[in-house]
Image (tube, grey):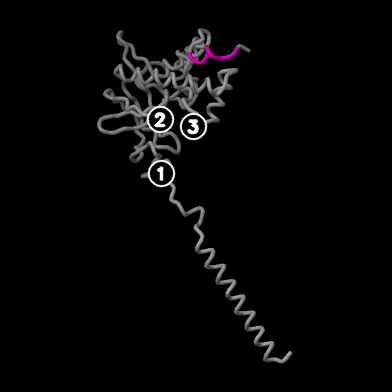
Amino acid sequence: MPLRDTLLNLAITAVLVLIVVLGGILLKESRPDPLSAVPVKIAGVPGETLPDEGGRPKEVAEKFLIFPRASLVESRANEADTLRIRIGSDEHIFVLYFVDALEASMNHPQRVADQARYFGRTNDKVITSTGIEAAAYVTELLKTRPFEVITRWERVPNTLRYYALIRFVREDGQRVYLMDLLLRKGYARLDGVDTLLPGDPRDLPTYLAELMSLSRKAREEKQGVWAKVSPP
């Protein structure tokens, strides 16, 4: 083959290779990066919220703060242990210390399954239907009886929700916590984050023993979900 033809073929080949490389680069740049195409808000990052949450995280307080004039904000996202509550002009979502109340939906199927195992031979439908019943019970309580929210603004991990105690004052002047009532009614299990009770003479082991006793009574008397558990 003459030298001129060889050089011509090499030149054509080089041009074709260049076209293929440039085409590949342009094609790659035209495709959206799946990790950066859509900005996603991350719960728990200052300024970033979940759809049902708002505001910036509160600083954790050294001591518990008591808010005696709180009011319930009715929401489809409320459950027996997770409640949107108004304090002054602000709304916050609070999660109860000490208890894990029955789920009222299948939004968290793993937790529903865990609860079904804990309460015995039952199923998801029993858990969620009783969870709806428990949420209605709490809603009625908070709408009809004055209550106070006690919190240090301790955040539930990866959310803008805060752990809290919710407390009622009975007609005899005695104070009772919402978690006591939930366990006694068979609407929750003893689980979750615990804390010392501010201004309460009971230490943590004593109070935990009382909660366990309330849970046992609910089981023995077949309260709440215990009435729907199949016998072994």
Quarter-wise, where is residue 65 in the image? top left
Q: Is residue 220 above or below residue 147?
A: above
Q: What residue type is labelled 3?
A: Asn
Type of the residue with mark 2: Ala
Residues rendered magenta in the picture: 224-230
> Where residue 230 sits: x, y (%)?
59, 13
Q: Name the residue under label 2.
A: 77
Name the image quarter holding the N terminus.
Answer: bottom right
Label 3 secondary element: loop
Rounded to the nearest whole Å, what is the CA distance between mark 3 and mark 1?
Answer: 22 Å
Q: Which residue is located at x 48 percent, y 19 percent?
A: 130
Residue at mark 1: 45
- Residue 106 image offset from top left, x and y in percent: 50, 29
* Secondary structure beneath label 1: loop
Q: Mark 3 points at which residue?
A: 107
The dot on residue 115 is: none
Q: Residues within 10 Å of mark 1 (few under 14, many from 20)?
A: few
Work out whether residue 82 or residue 135 is closer to the camera in this orientation and state it. Answer: 135
- The answer to which quarter of the image holds residue 74 is top left
In whole angstroms, how far apart are the C-alphas of marks 3 and 2? 10 Å
In the image: residue 113, left or right of residue 99: right
Closest to the camera, between mark 3 and mark 1, is 3
Q: Which of marks 2 and 1 is nearer the N terminus?
A: 1
Please check the rendered image and state whether residue 126 is part of the magenta-colored stretch, yes or no.
no
**Which one is nearer the viewer's eye here, 44 or 198?**
44
Residue at image x 35%, y 18%? Answer: 140
Residue located farthest toward the right when viewing the structure as drawn: 1
Magenta stretch: dominant secondary structure: helix
Spatial distance from mark 2 to mark 1, Cα to Cα? 21 Å
**Residue 123 x, y percent position in the rendering:** 57, 21
